Amino acid sequence: MKILVLNGPNLNLLGTREPKIYGRETLADIEADMRSLFPEVEIDFRQSNSEADLITWIGETRGQFDGIIINPAALTHTSLGVCDALKAVADVVPAVEIHLSNTHTREEIRHKSLTAPACVGQIMGFQGFGYTLALRALVNKLKS
């Protein structure tokens, strides 16, 4: 099983960026945890501050990946392009949306996700551990 893990804008700053909200784990820490807990899953872990990169990577998943875990970060609330890309592959490459914080407890603009309707599920509020939950959920979904 091969899973693409995508991380959007500013997530390269994890560990130092607003640790009370996002935690002290870095993306490298989160990736290492996922790999150690799921050695049977091939994980391709990527981050970009560019919406275009995320859209391109999603569009290239057909025939390459079994599923996507995506933290679109701020693009969650603004990107129809990321949503459309997820919808375009959803029939063969399901996605789970992940957020480190519970966006419903934050500013009102963060309460609506444009990308969630294109995903099979959404996990939020558990900081880095949410990625592990998302991977477990996606693996379960793909096996069923």
Image (tube, rainbow, N blue to C red):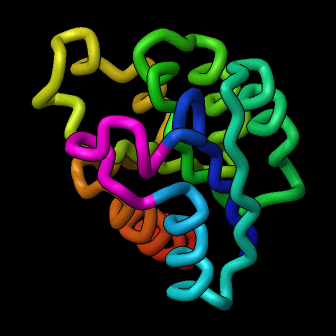
Of 106 and 122, which appears nearest the observer? 106
Of 4 and 105, which appears nearest the observer? 105
Of 123 and 73, which appears nearest the observer? 73
Q: Is residue 28 above or below residue 53?
A: below
Residue at 83%, 29% in the rendered image = 56
From where the camera sits, is residue 144 visible? Answer: no
- Whether residue 113 appears in magenta in the rendering, the answer is no
Of 9 and 2, which appears nearest the observer? 9
Q: Is residue 17 above or below residue 51?
A: below
Q: Residue furthest front?
A: 16
Please give the range of residues in magenta: 14-25
Quadrant location, the N terminus: bottom right
Residue 96 in picture, x, y percent from top left: 48, 50
For residue 54, side relative to residue 83 (left or right)? right
Q: Is residue 61 above or below residue 27?
A: above
For residue 107, side relative to residue 94 (left or right)? left
Q: Quadrant of residue 107?
A: top left
- Whether residue 19 appears in magenta in the rendering, the answer is yes
Q: Is residue 73 above or below residue 24?
A: above
Residue 39 in picture, x, y percent from top left: 64, 89
Residue at 77%, 19% in the rendered image = 52
For residue 43, side relative to residue 96 (left or right)? right
Helix, strand or loop for the magenta stretch, by majority = loop
Residue 117 in picture, x, y percent from top left: 42, 29
From where the camera sits, is residue 91 visible? Answer: yes
